[in-house]
Image (cartoon, grey):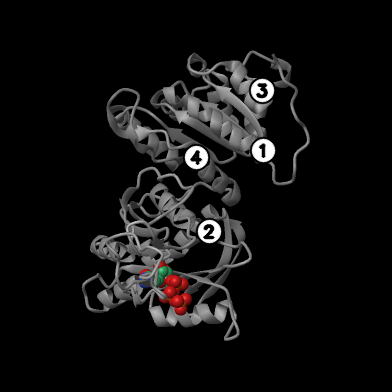
């Protein structure tokens, strides 16, 4: 079966080559291909011969709407081994096996995928998947370093259950995560920098839940998407990341990130304070509840004569302000960068920026990420816009873009802070 190739493309549609290596994680490439085509991109799938042991050619052809070959001798008049690479806007190899990366490093061109890699000049992203021993082998470590030196993005794998009963680093990240990183490469049209290697970064994300009785709580609409995007990207830029996650919805645990789960603002404060010790940066993107019910009923509050008219509230500690104070007191190192978020609507007393500037001064953090909210903006959606305000008075407007792109801009600003000369 040779499906016809779609030729109409929207202006933002890209030509994406999905290379598939011969590993069990090849099945996850099907969801990835579908995400690309559903976003309007044109996809060419190039499996290795061994990838076809795991997934049939017909599946890749049906999902991509394009013919699928592994060798350089099919369709020779169209010179596919040169043309596909030259025309590609992005190449994503998922899963990238140890063997496939070794062949790419060696400059081999003994099948259509490796030949395509040699002719491509677009961003290339390898998404490795293999057993931990293979991932940690010096040969693979050296090959990954070489691919990165040559400008490719090599994604850090996830940890967890591998093919057998064993667990460890080497799992293919979830397709949504690969899609988010690939989309970011398209938006940035550049490799992901490795500028956070050796840095320890703590990120808080999601909302908190303040219990009222055993079944009810006060909560908020934060999905955690922005904080998870920051944690994911910081890890892919080389940082050692701890994500302190409150309540979230619709987010996958990022690869190569340690996650601490909390529920209440008080639990979040304890976790952040503990993890901040020795961190290079703390990014407070969590929507922390400002108040909690003063008392928590031990049994369900019932309707009737004893029902309460009001719920008395107690102010929660301000975690961000506490971090700034801990740095002043020398509990945290003077060089620790502290980043806050401000979700603002603007009101009769001032617009979004006026409130944000006041918040930056009040909280005393180094960088404030400002997102206008309301009218369906920021909460529970995949895109964002706003401003970055720094303590030294600089203000950068951020165009509307994905939360991954917003994460990338926040981390660009963070690296500037981290690399500033110490006072
Ligand atoms: N924050 C915090 N601890 C709290 C409340 C907020 O650390 N108890 C942090 C958030 O994680 C965010 C920043 O403070 O980084 C700003 O949060 P926001 O809710 O916008 O600010 P508030 O302090 O609640 O200010 P206001 O109520 O005036 O908007």
Report x, y in % for residue 206.
Answer: 42, 58
Report x, y in % for residue 82.
Answer: 64, 26
* Residue pointed to by mark 1: 41
Task: Work out how far the residue at label 3 is from the one at label 1, CA to CA, in angstroms.
Answer: 19 Å
Relative to residue 309, is residue 54 depicted above or below?
above
Task: Work out how far the residue at label 2 is from the one at label 3, CA to CA, in angstroms.
Answer: 37 Å
Q: Secondary structure at mark 4?
A: helix
111 or 312, which is in the foreground? 312
Q: Secondary structure at mark 3?
A: helix
Report x, y in % for residue 154.
Answer: 44, 39
* Residue pointed to by mark 3: 80
Judged left or right of residue 89, residue 216 is left
Crowd band around label 4 with a 10 angstrom C-alpha radius: few (<14), some (14–19), many (20+):
many
Callout 4–callout 3 Cβ contact below 8 Å: no
User: Does the rendering let one see residue 324?
Assistant: yes
Residue at image coords 46%, 20% = 22
Report x, y in % for residue 280.
Answer: 31, 62
Q: Secondary structure at mark 2?
A: helix
Task: Work out how far the residue at label 1 is from the one at label 2, CA to CA, in angstroms.
Answer: 22 Å
Crowd band around label 3 with a 10 angstrom C-alpha radius: few (<14), some (14–19), many (20+):
some
255 or 220, which is in the foreground? 220
* Image quarter for ligand 1: bottom left
Crowd band around label 1 with a 10 angstrom C-alpha radius: few (<14), some (14–19), many (20+):
many
* Residue pointed to by mark 2: 406
73 or 352, which is in the foreground? 352
* Residue pointed to by mark 4: 178
Residue at image coords 49%, 74% = 389
Q: Earlier in the sequence, mark 2 or mark 3?
A: 3
Q: Nearer the viewer, mark 4 or mark 3?
A: 4
Q: Earlier in the sequence, mark 1 or mark 4?
A: 1
Task: Work out how far the residue at label 1 is from the one at label 4, CA to CA, in angstroms.
Answer: 15 Å
Q: Quadrant of residue 310?
A: bottom left
């Amino acid at each position: 079966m040779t499906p016809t190739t779609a030729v109409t493309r929207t202006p933002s549609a890209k030509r994406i080559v999905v290379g598939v290596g011969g590993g069990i994680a090849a099945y996850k490439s099907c969801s990835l291909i579908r995400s690309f085509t559903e976003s309007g991109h044109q996809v060419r799938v190039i499996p290795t011969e061994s990838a076809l042991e795991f997934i049939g050619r017909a599946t890749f052809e049906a999902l991509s709407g394009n013919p699928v070959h592994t060798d350089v001798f099919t369709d020779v008049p169209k010179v596919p081994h040169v043309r596909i690479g030259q025309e590609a806007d992005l190449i994503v190899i998922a899963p990238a096996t140890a063997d496939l990366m070794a062949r790419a490093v060696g400059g081999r061109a003994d099948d259509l995928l490796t030949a395509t890699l040699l002719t491509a000049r677009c961003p290339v992203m390898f998404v490795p998947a293999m057993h931990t021993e293979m991932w940690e082998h010096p040969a693979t470590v050296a090959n990954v370093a070489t691919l990165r030196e040559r400008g490719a993005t090599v994604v850090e794998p996830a940890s967890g259950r591998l093919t057998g009963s064993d667990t460890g680093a080497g799992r293919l990240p979830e397709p949504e995560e690969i899609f988010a990183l690939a989309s970011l490469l398209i938006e940035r049209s550049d490799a992901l920098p490795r500028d956070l290697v050796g840095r320890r970064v703590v990120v808080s994300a999601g909302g908190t839940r303040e219990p009222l009785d055993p079944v009810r709580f006060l909560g908020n609409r934060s999905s955690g998407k922005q904080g998870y995007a920051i944690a994911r990207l910081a890890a892919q830029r080389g940082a050692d990341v701890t994500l302190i996650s409150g309540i979230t919805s619709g987010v996958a645990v990022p690869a190569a990130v340690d996650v601490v789960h909390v529920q209440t603002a008080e639990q979040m404060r304890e976790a952040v304070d503990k993890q901040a010790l020795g961190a290079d940066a703390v990014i407070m993107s969590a929507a922390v509840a400002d108040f909690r019910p003063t008392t928590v009923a031990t049994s369900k509050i019932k309707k009737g004569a004893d029902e309460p008219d009001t719920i008395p509230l107690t102010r929660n500690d301000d975690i961000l302000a506490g971090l700034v104070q801990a740095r002043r007191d020398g509990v945290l190192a003077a060089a620790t960068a502290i980043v806050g978020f401000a979700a603002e609507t603007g009101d009769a007393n001032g617009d979004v920026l006026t409130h944000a500037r006041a918040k930056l001064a009040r909280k005393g953090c180094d960088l404030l990420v400002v997102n206008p909210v309301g009218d369906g903006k920021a909460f529970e959606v995949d895109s964002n816009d706003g401003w970055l305000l720094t303590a030294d008075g600089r203000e950068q407007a951020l165009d509307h873009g994905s939360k991954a792109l917003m994460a990338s801009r926040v981390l660009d600003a963070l690296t500037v802070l981290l690399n500033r000369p110490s006072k």
